[in-house]
Image (spheres, rainbow, N blue to C red):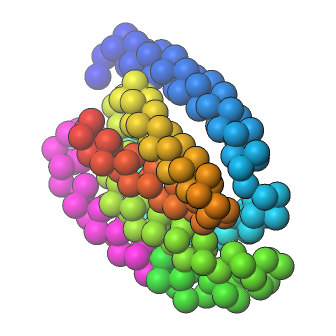
Amino acid sequence: MPAASLRSKVGKGLIWSSLNTVVGRIGQMVVGIALARLIAPEQFGVFAAALVVLNVVVSVSELGVSVAIVQAKDADEVDEIAPVVTTVSVASGTVLAGLMALAAPWLASALGAPEAAGPIRVLALSLVIAGLSAAPAACLQREFRQDRKLVADMASFAVSTAVALWMATAGYGAWSLAWSRVAGNAVLAVAMFALV
């Protein structure tokens, strides 16, 4: 790829990525304020405990194999390794999701929030979804298609917000936050597949 073309792609990617970050942060703040009025503070603590478990596990879930797509020499190499990346990501995500679900009561108790066991199990589904979307996400990153990532992120944000507000209004507390995260991740995965 010529240097001028690469510079242009990187520049556009940076602009779209910055816009995505700003819009996402503002949106999260507004939704967070609305949810704080609907969900009891202790339920946020329960969800925070579940989210800690997810964030620790997701950091190792796909074993870094998606980087192979980002660093591939050409499109033919991407086509060759994408199935392997998907297989490894889905397999590791599924195994870790199962372990996370099984260990949920122990993990929740260790974090001082035994009520978080259910939301931890729900959030475990995110690991499988992340495994399924690892290759498309890496392809978007490889091509600096932050404009398409913005579209996927906004679709995910819209669905997760709708689910969170609906369930919070119905009184589901921490469960509404967990299910909204899973719904948003599912929409993000579908959008990435559609946009790659």
Location of residue 53 by image quarter: bottom right
Does residue 106 appear in the picture of this structure?
yes
Q: Is residue 77 shown in magenta?
A: yes
Q: Residue at x 70, y 82 (%)?
A: 107
Question: In the picture provided, is 189 more to the left or to the right than 178?
Answer: left
Question: In the picture provided, is 193 more to the left or to the right than 118?
Answer: left
Q: Looking at the image, is 121 positioned above or below residue 143?
A: below
Magenta residues: mostly which secondary structure? helix
Quadrant in the picture for the N terminus: top left
Q: Is residue 34 shown in magenta?
A: no
Q: Position of residue 171 (x, y in %)?
A: 64, 61
Q: Position of residue 116 (x, y in %)?
A: 69, 75
Q: Position of residue 22 (x, y in %)?
A: 62, 24
Q: Residue at x 75, y 82 (%)?
A: 114
Between 8 and 135, the residue placed more toward the observer is: 135
Q: Which residues are magenta?
A: 74-95
Does residue 21 appear in the picture of this structure?
no
Q: Residue at x 60, y 74 (%)?
A: 120
